[in-house]
C-alpha cells in the first residue's frame, strides 16, 4: 500500500472511531419459517430433528436460539442458513420466506454470513491477513484496494483485535493469539462484507464471561445498523441474555416459545412456571424444559401453538430435488484467476511459515538417504565383479525410489485433514471454487517435491556411485514423488481425520511394492494381474532408472546380467518415452480423482 493510501486508511479510522463499519446502515430482511421439518436417516431408521417448526428473525434485532442438548437448535440454524443440503438421508420440508418471498436457503446461503462454532482459521495467518483474504474474494469487485484495506482496519478496531492484528493466529503446533481473539477473528472473517443477515453457531462457547458479553454486545451494535442476526447459545449469563431482543426456545425439535425476551417470562408464568426472584431467566427456562417431560409441558401449555398457515403462495417443499445438487460454481463470485492468486499467496505464506513441518520433511529425507548411501557405498561401481554387485546396485536404486515415494505421501496426505475445516468454511460460503483451491497448491507442492528429491538424489547418486544420466534420475524421482503425493491426496480428501489417514496410507502403497519387480519378477505374477503394473508409478520410475543406469554401462554380450535385470522387470529399451508418459498420465488421473473426491465430500455443506 502506498503512503498516501495508508494516510487515507488512518484518516478514515480516526473519523469513524471504534464504531468502525458498524455505523454503516444495512437493509436486513425479515426471515420467517413455518411447518419446517427435518428428518435424517433412511428406511425404518429415521429420526425427526425438527418437528413442525416455526418462528422469525427480525431485522435490527438479535435472536437467540436456545434449548437443551439435542433440542435441534443448531440444526434449525443450519437449515435456515442453507448449510444442510437435502438428500436421500436428509429430508427437509416446509416454508421459508425472506421479506415474504419464498426462498431456497441453499441457494441463498451465499448472501448470508455464517460463523461456525469452531474457529476454522489457518494457524499461519494473522487476523489482518484472514480478514483481507475474505474481503478480497467476497466483496464486490468495484471496491478499491484502499477502501478494502480501510474496511479491514476499521473492523479490526471494532472487534478489539487491532493490537494483535499482525500476530499469527496459531494452533496445535505453536501458540498465537488468545481464544477470545480467535473467536472475534472468526466472526470478523464473515462480517467484513457488511452482511445484512448473520448466523452464528455457539459464538460464546469457550469464552470467559467478559469476552462472551463483549461479543454479544458487538452483535447488538451490528443489529442496530439494520442487520438480521440469529445465533444459538447455551445457558448465557443474565447479563448476556438481557442483550438479546428475541428468543426461540426448542425442546425435542419443537418450538416451546418464540418471541420477545421480555414476554417470555409471562409465557412461562402462564404455564405454571413463574420466574423466581433474582434468578437468571435463561437458566430458569432451561431448567423447566429439562425438568418436565413433553407430556407435562403439553398439558401446561408450554408448547406455543403454530400459527395458522397464511393464505398466499404455496409452501416451498424442500425435497431431494435440485437444491441437493447445488454446488459452488467456479467463477460465480470471483474470477478464477483472482481466486488462484489469493489462494496462492496464502499457500506461499503457509509454506514458509510452517518451518517445523519442512524441517521434519527434509530432515528425514537427509537422514534416510544418507543412511542408504553409506550402507550401499559405491554399490554402483561397475569396476567391481558385476554379477556379485548387481543385486546391491539395483537394491540401492529400489530403496532410494521407495524413500522418494513415501517422502511426500504422508506429509501431503495429513495436511488436507488439518485444513479441511478452513476449506469447508470458505468453500461453503462461496469464497472460492474447489478447483482454484486445488490448483493453487500445486506449484508449491511441485517446488517442495523438487527440492526434496534433489536432496535425496545428491546424497544417493554420489555415495552409491550411480552412473546414469543425473537429469533422468531427477525427472524419474520427481515424477514418482508427485505421483505418490497425488495418491495420498485422494486419501486425504476422502478421510476427515489424520489418524485414519495414517492407518490407511501404508496399505495403499503395498501394490506399488508388489508390482515394482524387486520382490517378484513381473513374469511370475499371474497373467490376469499383470495389467496392474501400469497403474503403479513406482514401476514406471524404476523402468526409467533401469534404462538410464544400465543401458550405457552394460554391454549385453559381456554382462548378460543386464539383460536378465531388464527382463525380470519387463523393461523395454524402446519404451522410455512411454514410461515417462505413463507417470505423467497417472499424476493427472490421480489429481483429477482427488479433485472429484474433494468436491463430493464437500456436498454436505459445513
Image: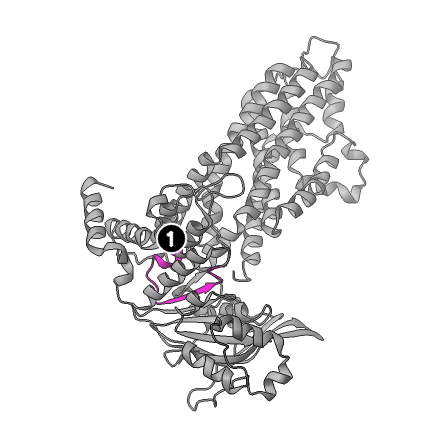
Residue depicted at x 57% and y 73%:
287
Please say if 91 is above or below 445.
Answer: below
Tally of numbered discs: 1
Q: Is residue 180 left or right of residue 539?
A: left
Please say if 388 is above or below 363.
Answer: above
Residue 400 included in the magenta stretch of the image = no
| Residue 242, x across and y down, in percent | 41, 70
Res 604 → quadrant? bottom right
Q: Can residue 565 be seen here? A: yes
Q: Which residue is mark 1?
A: 134
The foreground one among 111 and 237 is 237
10 Å neighbourhood of mark 1: few (<14), some, or many (≥20)?
many
Residue depicted at x 22% and y 48%:
9
Q: Can residue 36 be seen here? A: no
Quarter the N terminus occupies: top left
Q: Which of the colour schemes (rainbow, by chain, secondary structure, one colour) is used?
A: one colour
Please say if 604 is above or below 476.
Answer: below
Residue depicted at x 62% and y 79%:
292
| Residue 99, x across and y down, in percent | 36, 78
Mark 1, secondary structure of its residue? helix
Q: Is residue 373 left or right of residue 595?
A: right
| Residue 272, x across and y down, in percent | 55, 85
Identify the magenta region.
188-204
The foreground one among 588 and 578 is 588
Amino acid at each position: 500500500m502506498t503512503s498516501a493510501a495508508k494516510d487515507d486508511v488512518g484518516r478514515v479510522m480516526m473519523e469513524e472511531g471504534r464504531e468502525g463499519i458498524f455505523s454503516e446502515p444495512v437493509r436486513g430482511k425479515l426471515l420467517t419459517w413455518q411447518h419446517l421439518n427435518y428428518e435424517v436417516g433412511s428406511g425404518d431408521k429415521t429420526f425427526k430433528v425438527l418437528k413442525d417448526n416455526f418462528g422469525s428473525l427480525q431485522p435490527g434485532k438479535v435472536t437467540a436460539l436456545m434449548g437443551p442438548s439435542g433440542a435441534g437448535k443448531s440444526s434449525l440454524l443450519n437449515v435456515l442458513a442453507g448449510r444442510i443440503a437435502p438428500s436421500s438421508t436428509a429430508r427437509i420440508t416446509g416454508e421459508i420466506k425472506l421479506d415474504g418471498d419464498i426462498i431456497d436457503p441453499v441457494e441463498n446461503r451465499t448472501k448470508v454470513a455464517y460463523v461456525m462454532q469452531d474457529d476454522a482459521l489457518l494457524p499461519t495467518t494473522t487476523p489482518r491477513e484472514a480478514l483481507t483474504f475474505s474481503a478480497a474474494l467476497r466483496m464486490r469487485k468495484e471496491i478499491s484496494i484502499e477502501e478494502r484495506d480501510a474496511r479491514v482496519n476499521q473492523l479490526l478496531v471494532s472487534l478489539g483485535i487491532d493490537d494483535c492484528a499482525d500476530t499469527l493466529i496459531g494452533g496445535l503446533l505453536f501458540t498465537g493469539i488468545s481464544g477470545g481473539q480467535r473467536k472475534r477473528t472468526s466472526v470478523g472473517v464473515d462480517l467484513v462484507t457488511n452482511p445484512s443477515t448473520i448466523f452464528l453457531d455457539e459464538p460464546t462457547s469457550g469464552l470467559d464471561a467478559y469476552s462472551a458479553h463483549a461479543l454479544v454486545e458487538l452483535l447488538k451494535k451490528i443489529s442496530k445498523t439494520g442487520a438480521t442476526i440469529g445465533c444459538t447459545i447455551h445457558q448465557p449469563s443474565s447479563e448476556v441474555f438481557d442483550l438479546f431482543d428475541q428468543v426461540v426456545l426448542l425442546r425435542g425439535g419443537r418450538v416451546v416459545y418464540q418471541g420477545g425476551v421480555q414476554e417470555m417470562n409471562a409465557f412461562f408464568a402462564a404455564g405454571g412456571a413463574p420466574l423466581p426472584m433474582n434468578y437468571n431467566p435463561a437458566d430458569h427456562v432451561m431448567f423447566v424444559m429439562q425438568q418436565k417431560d413433553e407430556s407435562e409441558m403439553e398439558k401446561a401449555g408450554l408448547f406455543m401453538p403454530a400459527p395458522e398457515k397464511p393464505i398466499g403462495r404455496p409452501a416451498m417443499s424442500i425435497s431431494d430435488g435440485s437444491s441437493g445438487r447445488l454446488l459452488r460454481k467456479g467463477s460465480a463470485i470471483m474470477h478464477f484467476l483472482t481466486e488462484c492468486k489469493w489462494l496462492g499467496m496464502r499457500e506461499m505464506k503457509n509454506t514458509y511459515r510452517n518451518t517445523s513441518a519442512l524441517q521434519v520433511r527434509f530432515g528425514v529425507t537427509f537422514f534416510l538417504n544418507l543412511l542408504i548411501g553409506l550402507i550401499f557405498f559405491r554399490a554402483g561401481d561397475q569396476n567391481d565383479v558385476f554379477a556379485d554387485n548387481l543385486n546391491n546396485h539395483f537394491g540401492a536404486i529400489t530403496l532410494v525410489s521407495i524413500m522418494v515415494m513415501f517422502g511426500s505421501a504422508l506429509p501431503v496426505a495429513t495436511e488436507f485433514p488439518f485444513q479441511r475445516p478452513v476449506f469447508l468454511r470458505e468453500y461453503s460460503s462461496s469464497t472460492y471454487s474447489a478447483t482454484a483451491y486445488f490448483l493453487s497448491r500445486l506449484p508449491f507442492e511441485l517446488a517442495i517435491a523438487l527440492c526434496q528429491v534433489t536432496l535425496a538424489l545428491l546424497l544417493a547418486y554420489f555415495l552409491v556411485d550411480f552412473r546414469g544420466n543425473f537429469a533422468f534420475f531427477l525427472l524419474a524421482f520427481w515424477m514418482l514423488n508427485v505421483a505418490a503425493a497425488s495418491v495420498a491426496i485422494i486419501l486425504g480428501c476422502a478421510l476427515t481425520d489424520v489418524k485414519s489417514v495414517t492407518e490407511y496410507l501404508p496399505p495403499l502403497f503395498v501394490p506399488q511394492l508388489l508390482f515394482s519387480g524387486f520382490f517378484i519378477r513381473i513374469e511370475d505374477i499371474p497373467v490376469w494381474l499383470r495389467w496392474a503394473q501400469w497403474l503403479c508409478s513406482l514401476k514406471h520410475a524404476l523402468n526409467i532408472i533401469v534404462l538410464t543406469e544400465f543401458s550405457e554401462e552394460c554391454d549385453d554380450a559381456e554382462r548378460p546380467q543386464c539383460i536378465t535385470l531388464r527382463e525380470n522387470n519387463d523393461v523395454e529399451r524402446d519404451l522410455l518415452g512411454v514410461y515417462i508418459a505413463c507417470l505423467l498420465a497417472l499424476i493427472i488421473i490421480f489429481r483429477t480423482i482427488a479433485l472429484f473426491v474433494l468436491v463430493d465430500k464437500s456436498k454436505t455443506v459445513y
